[in-house]
Image (cartoon, rainbow, N blue to C red):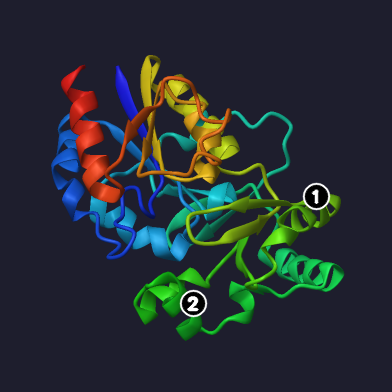
Amino acid sequence: MKIVAFSDLDATLLDGETYSWKPAERAIEALHQRAAALVLVTSKTLSEVGPLHEELGFDDPFVFENGGGIAFPKGSSLREHLSLGKQQIGEFQREGFTVLALGTRYETLVKSLAEISAQIGATLIGFSTMSNEEVAKATGLPLEQGVRARMRLFDEPFMIQEGSKSLESEIQGAAIRRGLAVVKGGRFWHLMGHAGKGKAVAILLEAFRKRYGEVLSIGLGDSPNDFPFLQLVDIPVVLGKPSEAELDSSLPEGSLRYDAPGPKGWNQAFLDILATL
């Protein structure tokens, strides 16, 4: 049986303040020992995730920009097991990875966010209008990582100007009328033109089953934009303490809850799960 773990990054595998995964080192090593797959599923960019993917030492694909793209390392055997039906999906090479493009391109999203902002009469501050320094400050990232966070392909993170929170439903409606979607992440809202993390994980999960047969899937996340892919796995895990409003019917019944956020909770969850197998 192949163990396949799908994991969010910020405030899940990575600490929400330090962005370190080191407190999860024991669990990472345990997954390596069992030849498990670890698929990162994140709002981060390809440029951000690539170095982390190499550091963790797994050779599995990863999902970036909230499901806008799937990146396959060179030589990945999983690519040939994808079943995309009649979908017209672009594919290109970027930073040493083969990228499967599931989302609307970034230039269109930037233009649409400006239109939505003007339409509803509220300032929506996207990464495209922020400097590298402003993004680094807003995310708590070092400047170099802030630069990587702005190298976007399929997803525009944005903040709603203080005092405009009541316009959230209006923003959602304006996005939908343009064939786009707005989702709430841990720190930012995201404008995107694809089906989110759930669609990308569904594609990969089917590929893993074709490649390995029997698969035990585990999913870990901490915020509402993780819930769609948590619904697809055998063992869903929610870390930290989402608000009751966030823990609605979209959360799968039987989800494991760990109050400890970030890599400490991640580490404990995996050690507990692996101990039962």
Q: Are marks 2 and 1 in contact (CB under 8 Å)?
A: no
Residue 17 relative to residue 79: left or right? left
Depth check: 231 or 242 in front?
242
As measured in the structure, the alpha-carbon distance from the residue carrying label 2 to the one carrying label 1 is 26 Å
Q: Position of residue 270 (x, y in %)?
A: 24, 33
Which residue type carries mark 1? Ile
Circle 2: element type = helix
- Specify the label residue 135 is tagged with: 2
Number of numbered discs on residues: 2
Q: Position of residue 55 (x, y in %)?
A: 24, 56
Q: Is residue 79 left or right of residue 92?
A: left
Label 2 vs 1, first from the N-terminus: 2
Q: Using a 10 Å C-alpha cutoff, classify the residue at mark 1 as few (fewer than 14 neighbours), some (14 to 19) or many (20 or more).
A: few
What residue do we see at 30% from left, 50% from top?
262
Image vertical order of residue 7 relative to residue 271, above or below: below
Q: Quadrant of the C terminus?
A: top left
Quarter of the image with the N terminus is top left
Q: Residue 275, position in %: x, y? A: 16, 22
* Residue type (three-letter) at the residue carrying disc 2: Val
Q: Residue at x 41, y 41 (%)?
A: 221
Residue 276 location, quadrant: top left
Left/right placement of residue 81 relative to residue 39 reads right
Question: Disc 1 designates what residue?
Answer: 176
Q: Is residue 122 visible?
A: yes
Q: Position of residue 59 (x, y in %)?
A: 32, 44
